[in-house]
Amino acid sequence: MTSGDSVADIRGRLGEIGYICDAGIATALYLCRELDKPLLIEGPPGVGKTELAKAAASITGRPLIRLQCYEGLDETKALYEWKYGKQLLYTQVLKEKLGDLLQGAKGLKDSLGRLHEFDDTFFSEEFLEPRPLLKALWEKDGAVLLIDEIDKADDEFEAFLLELLSDYQISVPELGTIKARTTPLVFLTSNNKRELGDALKRRCLHLHIPFPDMALEQAIIKSRVPQAEPRLRAQLVSFVQGLRKLDLKKLPAVSETIDWARTLVLLNAKDLQPDLVRSTLNVLLKYQDDIVEAEPEVGGLIATAHKEAEYRAIN
Amino acid sequence: MTEVLSDFIRALRAADVRITTSEAIEAGATLALIGYEDRELLRQGLAQALSKSVDEKQAFFETFDSFFAFRSFSEGGGAQGAAGEDDKGAPGEGQSPGGEQGEQQGEAEGQGGQPSGKASGQGMGAGESEPAERESLVDLLERGDRAALQERLADAARRVNLNDIRFFTQRGMFAVRILNLMGVEEVDDVIAAAEASDDPGERGRGERLHAARTALREEVRDYVEKQLAIFAANAGRKLREEILADTRLNAIDRSDMRIMQELVRKMAKRLIALHARRRRIARRGQLDIRRTIRANIEYDGLLFHTVWKRRRLERPKVMALCDVSGSVSQTARFLLMFLYSLHEVLPNVRSFAFSGNLGEVTELFEHNDVDYAMAETLSRFGGSTDYAEALETFERLAGDEVDHRTTVLILGDARNNNGEPRADILRKIHDRARRVIFLNPEPRSSWNTGDSVMRKYEACCDTAQVCATLKDLERVVSDLMRTAI
């Protein structure tokens, strides 16, 4: 993905590396690159939010730097940390060298004067241990920075990100401002565990990735699990789409569909059969309650899936 | 930024999409980048720049579709509905929603909204002065030039500031102003003259013009109607919500119930946002010396890292006792609705309903829709009020679980049908609980009148307050959350 690529180009490039997406997602990448804006991605778990960042890294050829958020994450883990050990050693070395430095100095004033002239590196970039955010700013040719599950971090951390997101710079109190060498592509993902602040949202473009529709999901399976035959593919996608209409605790997402397709291929399935589906339902549904809820519907859903696959085969 | 975009943003704001200035600038940059050529691209791009949540996205797409709807004067709108008109009409169809196409193009090419871009736009600037070489409306109608009519309509609409329209009662006024600006008076004169004339040819012309004028009027009314829908989508509702929030709960009409529920949900959401933050701040405790020393062994005992004691999160417990007899039941309904909308920040709510006897309704409200739960509660616990019996049962059912973290909310009118008030039970509860709050939907002036035993109960409560409207309720619940944490 270089400057000048159109939305269609980006979509094609993503498709080449196996990330099948709709126009909305490609537009988001395009705008995010052209406007130098961070992209906030929301959507149910498992629809490929994190994958999008990985795919963007892969088509731009930039390194992916990932920061996983959690409660209690603070700047020493996200941004930078002083190398305390080395700083301690430095002061000790300094103490030893002090004698040489002050040799021949007359009086206190002269000594202090020499001390001030001495180049102080106690707080300098050499003693700075970069964490993901700083690493992303220091990357020469720009990086893809993925701030994953920002909704899990605290409010304070969110506020702390604002400077980075709007100006691509961070302030280290002892050193001043550190600017990005090349503007990184920044992706933030959120599962909406809590409402994000307006200030953060305002600084980002916002992309919502919903569950894919039938055609898109088929294309995804075709790209990810090419071993699955067209008929099985059509059937299993239709089945999962049907499953999403039920009232379940956690709806199966694309990643589950892919896993299930792999499972079915591994079991040499050519066709959806009720027994097979029931015994592999745990790949799709992650809660026992959901499995119990879905089991009576399996027969009906399979019948619909068969019909739909046939309809597609005819057309 | 083009006028189209700022109009569109106003329309979005009317549809409850929050847009800040910086986002508007963003949208301008997006527009400069992608232009107007690809509708789908524009739709997705603006959606990503302007709407920042799933709800807002939905509102955005609806507004986008109606705002950028391609419309032109309907067939036969002109005096001569001849076939040749289609060619002329075609360019008009690309003009959304009025004749701003020229400006849009100018903007996309100029990349920065220079005034020249606007001026080049078919001479349709928003200036107040009449264009010198303006064709008369009569000619336009007779030719049936839909594109030009559409253009003139949009121009007139802009000059009367149609995008300021707020209420449906303004429709007529705006329609008349637009028609006048378009030059309908001239048409009236021509028609009048034609009708008075003896020449049959002239008469025919008058009739055709008459029909065309009627069509034009309809067209204008339609246009105003659509703009009203776009720019004033929620104005009426907002006004109504404001009024409803101040109306006494038992005087609220059944037809407003839906709005009320929506309102409660909104208020609850606001309270959650407000208090979620407070809870986190309250968690920061004191320095944990032992753990700090342990964490800093690697630095030769120098205390670089500080570890803080975490104050244990107190889960506030709320027990709500609601009188569900007669007039109080409506207030009870909203109180319960409120409490259960706050599940995220108030996870421990137990509710009890009483009038004749008392029983727990926690499960009922947690798992069911409010309407159903309320009806069920009324059929189970309806009857004449007996506070003594209710307090006794409560003491027996849940008295042991009232502790120093529990807030007890009692909602009722304290009208005990001249029975024994048994305030001593309430005092016992008060001694154990963190707080007892009495909410009375009656105005303070009618407390202690008739069979009301409010005075006795008031003495055993930390606070007793009037709670008659949704605003009162919000205040009570907000207060509850502030101090419960």
Image (cartoon, coloured by chain):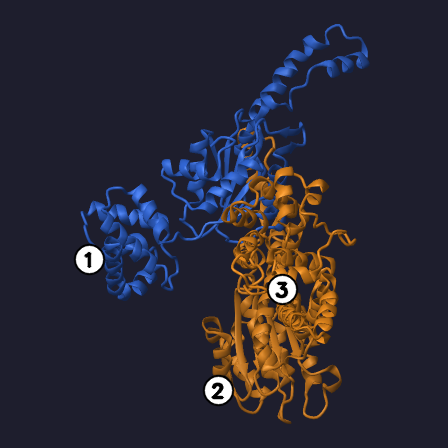
Name the amino acid, label 3.
Answer: Tyr
How far apart are the two marked residues, 2 and 1, measured between alpha carbons? 49 Å
Quadrant location of the C terminus of chain B in the rendered image: bottom right
Output the letter for the chain in orange.
B
Name the amino acid, label 2.
Answer: Ser
Where is residue B320 shown, x and y percent of the image? 57, 75
Marks 3, 2: nearer the viewer? 3
Where is residue B401 shown, x and y percent of the image? 52, 71
Marks 1, 3: nearer the viewer? 3
* Image: B46 above or below B436: above
Q: What residue did someone put label 3 on?
A: B223
Q: Of residues A312 and B24, which is closer to you in this image?
A: A312
Q: Of residues A292 and A169, which is closer to you in this image?
A: A169
Element type where label 1 sits in the image:
loop
Q: Of residues B260 and B321, which is closer to you in this image?
A: B260
Instruction: Name the tint of chain A in the rendering.
Output: blue
Where is residue B105 shown, x and y percent of the image? 61, 43
Q: What residue did someone put label 2 on?
A: B379
Element type where label 3 sits in the image:
helix
